[in-house]
Amino acid sequence: MNQPRSQSMRVDISNGQSQLNKEIVTKLKSLNPSSFVTYEVLDLFFTQLQSILKEIQIKQEDQERIFIYFKKINEFENKLVALEQLVNRIAQVVIPLQEELIEKVSKGQTQQQTIEKYFQTFPQQLDLILNDRFSFLENQSNHYSKQFKNIEEDINEVQNHIKKQDNDILILLKSYKELLSIDPQYKQLKQQLNIISEGLNDIKQHIFL
């Protein structure tokens, strides 16, 4: 199996490569120097695996931030509900007050014109205030609905990307299992790859529960 080293498959293990991976690859190279190209590919696999695991961790942190954001939105919605309830209570107080004032006006001709003028403008002012408030609440609701949709699309894009990377890794692992099954000398390395496969499946199940 003496094959020329492919320039596209060479990996600089000094960048982003852990000491453990260096030792594993070096040991494998010493066991069978004729398979050096194969171990260069394995070296590349270790580097890519570390990068993907780091990316998964970053995505999990992003999801945690999204969860906090949704929690704040929920708190804001609760405050809006409380505000609406307060407006209803104010209306319940204003209506009886209006009736009481009308009764007093009937007893005092001097105050009648002033009270009538007040009640002519009061409904308009109240409607203006309430319409402005409800318009603001509606705009805020539409704004957050749009943001929710964008966040949901981002989450779906992240999940699809992670799924694709996970499938690519599993295909790569399967290829190495088939390659290593040719020679009993690679039995121990094959077992290690099986452990990595199980770990990736666990990560996948944890993310997409």
Image (cartoon, helix red, strand yellow):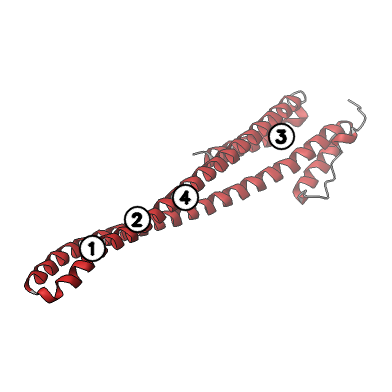
Q: Amino acid at mark 3?
A: Gln
CA–CA distance in space, label 2 to label 3: 73 Å
**Residue drawn at point x = 9 percent, y = 68 percent:** 103
Q: Seen from this angle, which residue lies furthest bottom?
A: 110
Question: Residue at image x 16%, y 65%?
Answer: 98
- The mark found on residue 120 in the picture is 1
Q: Which mark is drawn over residue 131?
A: 2
* Classed neighbour count for the residue bearing mark 2: other residues with Cα under 10 Å, few (<14), some (14–19), many (≥20): few
Residue at (45, 57) in percent of width and height: 72
Q: Depth-wise, is mark 4 or mark 3 nearer the camera?
A: 4
Tell me the element at label 1. Answer: helix
Is residue 151 left or right of 108 when viewed as pictured?
right
Asked if marks 2 and 1 touch (Cβ < 8 Å), the reply is no
> Alpha carbon of mark 1 to alpha carbon of mark 3: how far?
91 Å
How far separated are the C-alphas under marks 2 and 1?
18 Å
Give the residue number, with chain letter if any, for mark 4: 144
Tags 2 and 4 touching, CB below 8 Å = no
Between tags 4 and 1, which lies in front? 1
Q: Where residue 173 appears, x then y in whole percent?
A: 69, 31
**Residue type highlighted by circle 1:** Gln
Element type where label 3 sits in the image: helix
